[in-house]
Amino acid sequence: MEQFFAQTKAQIYTGNQASYNQTNDKIQMPPFESFESISAYYAILGHEITHWTKHPKRLDRDFGRKKFGDEGYAKEELVAELGACLMAASLGFEPIPEEQHAAYIQSWMKELQNDKRFIFSAAAHAQRAVEYIQSFQMAKNCIPV
């Protein structure tokens, strides 16, 4: 899994919290040993690297976020969480315990009461993000003809 994420060339550094900063285009992750399991670390990294795909030089995903917790923020969080789940499934591991995962998604869905169909759009955005991330793997493994 380390190689999978490294091949994206995303700038990932160790810090005190998991986050993606679009301004400096870097992902911050807590130390590996601070996680309960390998899967927990990579599930969070999958979430943050899904955020990384929103940058204008990648998939240019913008939901009009103005502040923490607003509708645009909630939409991006839902995309990142779905992306992390899709990525985990493609890599063959359970991202986080199912109850916690469902609760996290539900917390953001409450913010999206005005857009009841956004879950479908979020799933499509998440799928594009995962395909984009996976493209780094395919490019490396392609043999020129």
Image: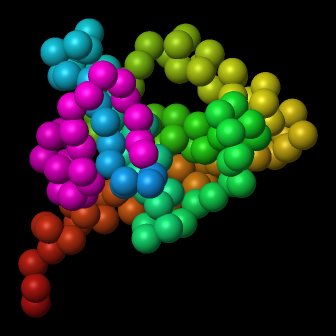
Residue 137 position within the rendered picture, expressed as x and y whole percent measured from the top left = 21, 60
Residue 44 position within the rendered picture, expressed as x and y whole percent measured from the top left = 37, 29
Q: Residue at x 32, y 48 (%)?
A: 26
| Relative vertical location of residue 111 with respect to residue 97 in this rendering, above or below | below
| Relative vertical location of residue 66 with respect to residue 25 in this rendering, above or below | above
Q: Quadrant of the C terminus?
A: bottom left
Q: Residue at x 13, y 47 (%)?
A: 3
Q: Is residue 77 visible?
A: yes
- Left or right: where 29 falls relative to 48: left
Residue 99 position within the rendered picture, expressed as x and y whole percent measured from the top left = 55, 11
Residue 37: quadrant of the picture: top left
Q: Quadrant of the N terminus?
A: top left
Q: Indicate whether residue 16 is drawn in magenta.
A: yes
- Left or right: where 28 falls relative to 72: left
Q: Indicate whether residue 127 is drawn in magenta.
A: no
Residue 32 position within the rendered picture, expressed as x and y whole percent measured from the top left = 18, 22
The segment highlighted magenta reads 1-21
Q: Residue at x 78, y 30 (%)?
A: 111
Q: Nearer the viewer, residue 140 or 74?
A: 74
